Image (cartoon, helix red, strand yellow):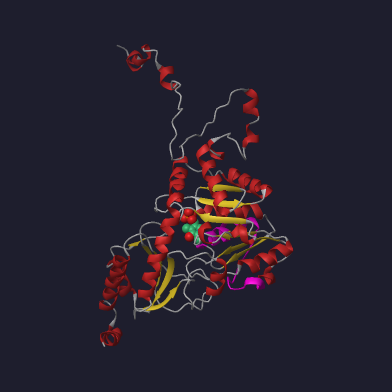
Amino acid sequence: MNFRRSILVMTVFKTDTNHIRQPARSTSPFRSLGVAIERASTVVFDDLEAFEQRSERLYDGFSYGLYGTPTSRALEDHIALLEGGTRALVTPSGLSAIVVATMACATAGDRVLLPDTLYGPAKDMAHQILAPFGVEVVVYDPRLDAAIESHITPRTTLIWVESPGSATLEVQDISAIVAVAKAKGIPVAADNTWASHLLYRPLDHGVDIAMQALSKHASGHGDLLMGSLAVRDEALFRRLKDKARLLGYGVSPDDCALCERGLKTMPVRMRQSAATAAEVIIWLKEQPQVARVLHPAEPDHPGHKVWERDFKGAAGVFGVVLKPCGRDAQSAALSALHVIQIGASWGGVHSLVAPSDPRKGRQFCDWLPDGPYWRLSIGLEDSADIIADLAKAFSALVAHAPRQTSNQLGHAAE
Ligand SMILES: *Cc1c(COP(=O)(O)O)cnc(C)c1O
């Protein structure tokens, strides 16, 4: 048999078309409780006219998988409802949601204001991508509140807020900032990932764009990446959607369905996480190794009053500053943890610790006491197990502390 004949032998069976075309079958009366996962790059049309008019379907209908599937639109409708918006857009990560919102509002020559506490990679994005394109990026002290006015110029086209802020949890008076911005016609965007729509709805407080990293509380299991932007203004929604389209941002319908599933348990997860976090914080504050706990629900937190005024509750994510102890002691303490795992991201069912230095890359953080910083995200494990885990870590810390702490050891034993 020659080679060409042997390689094409299967073509004698004329079944190829049947392999491509699925037989039609009615799905009625099937109805499931989950959102249907509909995958697509290609969307097909009935006729020439429908195909030629597909771009008109960008904002509502379906034209190409990148611009929306029934699964992503279902999640967007749900987010819009929960945020108190009329429209929402989902993007492939929290960071990409920040990119879309910022690029939709600022172009060369414009000024954007970012709080010093804005999610670190978002600040890096602004400095490394937007600034070289001519956007003026100004980082402000998150404690400025109404005094932010001093940073506003006629070319200021966007103010970001994040409250409580990344890592150090400063609370911003968003209403005061919105009042200043509204008077000058400047849109305000809020990274509301810590609180989520459950504890604070930015749109109800006059914010124009409510953003959250759905990777955190909403998806809730540390296994997917997505972000959302919710608005009440159709023209603004279209600007955001256009920008996401031109940047090539699309989301996987599988991830959307997982996120939709996450939303359903989100309130019970967040309540439980906050309740356990409260127990952990009470215990932490009694430990001699702890210099400070950073959580806005703490009455001695500088932002406590504004937090109490604006927020409906607490999230189980907070910062702990340890007394200065040396790298080896800190490292031994982290290695002693077994219930709490070392990792970035938060808001999921697993308790996590992210040891990092929030002073790095910050301009307005001099108030933070010296010592190692741990961001804790309390998951759904038993509170006694989490506290016992931390107790083991602190024992390891004391055992590995450098010499001068033998005094402290003595005190601790007293
Ligand atoms: C995690 C996080 C983001 C980014 O979300 P990704 O989905 O990881 O890109 C943005 N803002 C805050 C406050 C976050 O914690």
The one of 152 and 309 positioned closer to us in this rendering: 309
Q: Is residue 72 above or below residue 338?
A: above
Image point 65% across, 58% down: which residue?
A: 134
Name the quarter where the N terminus is drawn: top left
Name the quarter where the C terminus is drawn: bottom left
The one of 270 and 6 positioned closer to us in this rendering: 270
Residue 347 visible in the picture: no
Query: Which image quadrant is residue 43 in?
Result: top right
Q: How many marks?
A: 0
Q: Is residue 188 left or right of residue 95?
A: right
Residue 124 falls within the magenta-colored stretch: yes
Q: Is residue 48 left or right of residue 406?
A: right
Residue 370 falls within the magenta-colored stretch: no
Expressed as whole percent of the image width and height from the top left, the position of residue 276 reads 37, 66
The one of 225 and 198 positioned closer to us in this rendering: 198
Query: Which image quadrant is residue 369 in?
Result: bottom left
Where are the magenta residues, as a range?
119-147
Q: Is residue 28 left or right of residue 45?
A: left
Query: Which image quadrant is residue 172 in?
Result: bottom right
Task: Name the outermost residue toward the front.
Answer: 29
Expressed as whole percent of the image width and height from the top left, the position of residue 48 reads 63, 23
Image point 50% across, 43% down: which residue?
A: 251
Expressed as whole percent of the image width and height from the top left, the position of residue 258 reads 43, 45
Q: Is residue 178 above or below residue 254?
A: below
Expressed as whole percent of the image width and height from the top left, the position of residue 110 reads 69, 59
Residue 336 visible in the picture: yes
